[in-house]
Amino acid sequence: MLLSLSLLAALLGAAPTPPSQEFRVTWLGHAGFEVVSPGGTRLLIDPWLKENPRAPEAWKDLARLARTPPAAILLTHSHGDHAQDVHTLARLSGAPVVGTGETLRWLKVPEAQQHTVNVGGSTRIGDVTVHAVPAMHSCEPDGRPLGYVLVLPGGRSLYHTGDTWLFGDMALVQELLHPDIILLNVGGGRYGMDPRTAALAVRKYFRPSVIVPMHFGTFEPLATEPQAREVLGSDPRVHWLTPGIAASL
Ligand SMILES: [Zn+2]
C-alpha cells in the first residue's frame, strides 16, 4: 500500500514538511533573470541575451533556448536592453509574454501570446501570482514601465524592480506585497538610481531578507561592480550573483 508523505507524517504524529519556498534564480546579466518556482514554473524576466555583454554564452542561442519554452516571458518595458530579443524568443518558443498591451503590440509579439497586464493587475502563471507594479522610468512609444512582484502560494515573494528611481509608492508595494527578495536596479549613470539611491530605497521602504543587485557593469555609464560593491557590499542580505549560475534564494 502506498502512503502519501503527508499521511505518513500524520500517522507518525509529525508535522508534514512544508512545501519549499525557495526561488531558483539565475542572473542572465544586466536585468535578465530566469526564475523557477518550487512548483517548477519557469519564468524569463527581461531576457536581453544576444548583444548583452554580460549574458552567458550558453544563453545567446535563442533558437536552442526556445526549444524549452518558459511558462512565460515577463517584460518590464520596451527599451532594447530589456526587450530586444523578446519578439524573436516569443516567435520561436510560442511562450506567452507578460507586459503592457502598448509595449507588446509595439514589439509585434504574436497576438495570441500577448498576456497583457497593467499597474495594479495580477495574473497567475503556474503556481506563481505575478503582480504588475509601477516603475519610475519611461517606455516607448507609449504605455508605461513596470516592475513585477512574484508571489508563491505560501506567500514568499520576489520583486524585480525594472528600471526605476526610488519613488514614494514603493511604500505601498511593501505594504501590499512585502517582497522577501528584491532584484534591485542599482546601475545609475544617466538612466536610473545609482547604488547609493538604491540602498536608500531599500532602507526607506522595504524589509527584504535577500537583495540581488542588477543592471550595473554592463556598459558605460552604468556603475561598475566595484562601485556597486563599495556601497552595498557591507549589507549581509546582498547576494552577488554570477551570470549563468543558479542560486536558491
Ligand atoms: Zn535598462
Image (tube, rainbow, N blue to C red):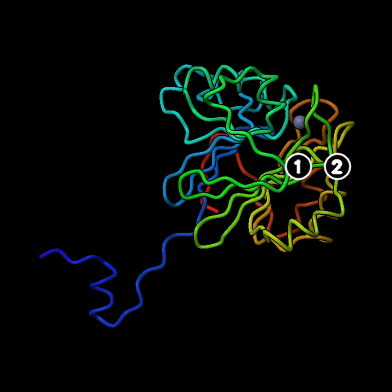
Expressed as whole percent of the image width and height from the top left, the position of residue 230 reads: 81, 48
Amino acid type, residue under disc 2 in the picture: Met
Q: Quadrant of residue 157?
A: bottom right
Which residue is depicted at the point 65% across and 28% down? 54
- The first of marks 1 and 2 along the sequence is 1
**68 horizontally vs 146: left or right:** left
**CB contact under 8 Å: marks 1 and 2:** yes
Circle 1: residue type: Asn
**Residue tagged by mark 1?**
185
In the rendered image of this protein, does residue 177 appear above or below residue 65?
below
Q: Quadrant of the C terminus?
A: bottom right
| Depth order, front residue of 108/42 | 108
Q: Is residue 115 visible?
A: yes
Can you say which quadrant of the picture contains the N terminus? bottom left
Instruction: Kindly identify which numbered label has been placed on residue 126.
Output: none
* Mark 1: C-beta under 8 Å from nearest atom of ligand 1: yes
Q: Which residue is mark 2?
A: 193
Q: Which of these two is toward me, 153 or 225?
A: 153
134 and 210: which one is in front? 134
**Horizontal and vertical percent position of residue 85:** 61, 20
Element marked by disc 2: loop
Ligand 1 is within 8 Å of the C-beta of the residue at disc 2: no
